[in-house]
Image: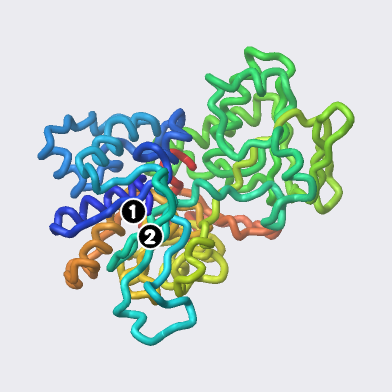
Amino acid sequence: MGAGPAGLAAAAHLRSREMDVLVLEAGPTAGSAVSEWGHVRLFSAWSELIDPAAEKLLADAGWATPDLKRYPTGSDWVRSYLQPLADVLGDAVRYGTTVTSVAKQSRDRLVSSGRDEAPFTVHVRSPEGAGHIVARAVVDASGTWTDPNPLGGDGVLAIGEAEAADRISYRIPDLRDQSVRYAGKHVVVAGTGASAKGALIALTALAKDAPGTRVSWLVRRATVGDAFAGSGQDELPERGALGQLAQEAVSKGPVTTLNGFRTARVDRDADGLLTIRSFDGQTVDRVDEAIVLTGFRPDLQMLSEIRLDLDPVLQAPRDLAPLIDPNEHSCGTVYPHGAKELAQPEVGFFFVGMKSYGRATSFLALTGFEQTRSVAAAIAGDHQAAARVELTLPDTGVCGGAGVFDDETEQSGGCCGTPVAPELITLGRPGGQ
């Protein structure tokens, strides 16, 4: 499910094992979600954005390898890799096909008898109408892009947030096309991740050409803390540079930072402008536009008839969650993981890609490629290869996780009080999303 980087990689690995595979993509093209942030440049170079099994399929079809040292945009990734890979897979990729639910054939969630042997029924909606597909295994690589977190500080929509939808965006803006919407306006940016940093940089640059543009930056923590951390310690230089540029933008640009701001409600005044209020009484008024970049969450509704074993905090596979939980391992180690950690109680069902991380925001394409290699091996019955997982990721240099509330004690040395040294750790989502 999903013709993005992880879904297509899974298909490539299954094809390399001569297995029948079908990729279901809701959008009109491969990488439809990536295309929506196509203006964003990725932190990873081309060398870290191409799956090995996919590369072989493409090479056999005469594909020209990009300059592996360059850093593509999301659009580059789609145009030069994801769509060509989907084209090589041919009829195995079905576009405009939305998965509405997944179940076990002739069995609802309560029925255990014969469940492991029963095939899956994948219910879909396409231009041809509704239908279902019978499958022996399902790999959910549908990502989290369609489910952004709300502005509300308690994880649900703030009062009035839905009613103000025309003035709220949950995507990093492309100011090449949207400058009129933000130029000369009072803009609120909520969030401290890479996307929020990118928005702050873009808006402060816009302010140089559009006087009157000002930004209110809503930070949920008591202090900005480690929002810019890692700039000098990040083994992904493009991500480290982003932190440095964002820090400069905030210090020199028309940016007002409001710490400890957890939104409770959004009101609209007689002029149509917004007033955003926090639970502790802070207020930002006369807001023209709000850009909410507070992360994403997985859509689990379509899996309501599938038996899942998910962590109650992250909504990630239970065995994987302790390795990526920002409450515990904001700068810790991503241990090698694959089919064993990603499997669910339903035999043959696996999460891969960004969705496998649930609400955790740390993910790299390299992680997804290794996940799909292991999962494909498991589906093919090659359990030795499935267990042989190797995952080495660059150091982020960032301490302090999303789970931190108001108590942000200073760390000494490296992450979590340990000496600064290269580690295997969780990272930011490709493209900074």
Residue linked to disc 2: 132
Q: What residue is shown at x 28% (from left), y 53% (from top)?
A: 22
- Disc 1, SS: helix
Q: Do the residues labelled 1 and 2 touch (CB within 8 Å)?
A: no
Residue linked to disc 1: 368
Task: Judge the density around disc 1: few (<14), some (14-19), many (≥20) Cα neighbours within 10 Å.
Answer: many
Left or right: 151 as drawn, with respect to 390: right
Q: Where is residue 396 in the image (x, y as percent from the top left)?
A: 43, 48
Q: In this view, does 318 lie above or below 209?
A: below
Three-letter code, disc 2 = His
Question: Earlier along the polypeptide chain: callout 1 or callout 2?
Answer: 2
Left or right: 156 as drawn, with respect to 146: right
Task: Judge the density around disc 2: few (<14), some (14-19), many (≥20) Cα neighbours within 10 Å.
Answer: some
Quadrant position of residue 55: top left
Q: What residue is shown at x 40% (from left), y 43% (from top)?
A: 96
Q: Where is residue 426 in the image (x, y as percent from the top left)?
A: 42, 55
Q: In this view, does 379 lie above or below 27?
A: below
Q: In this view, does 372 lie above or below 161?
A: below
Q: Where is residue 70 in the image (x, y as percent from the top left)?
A: 30, 29
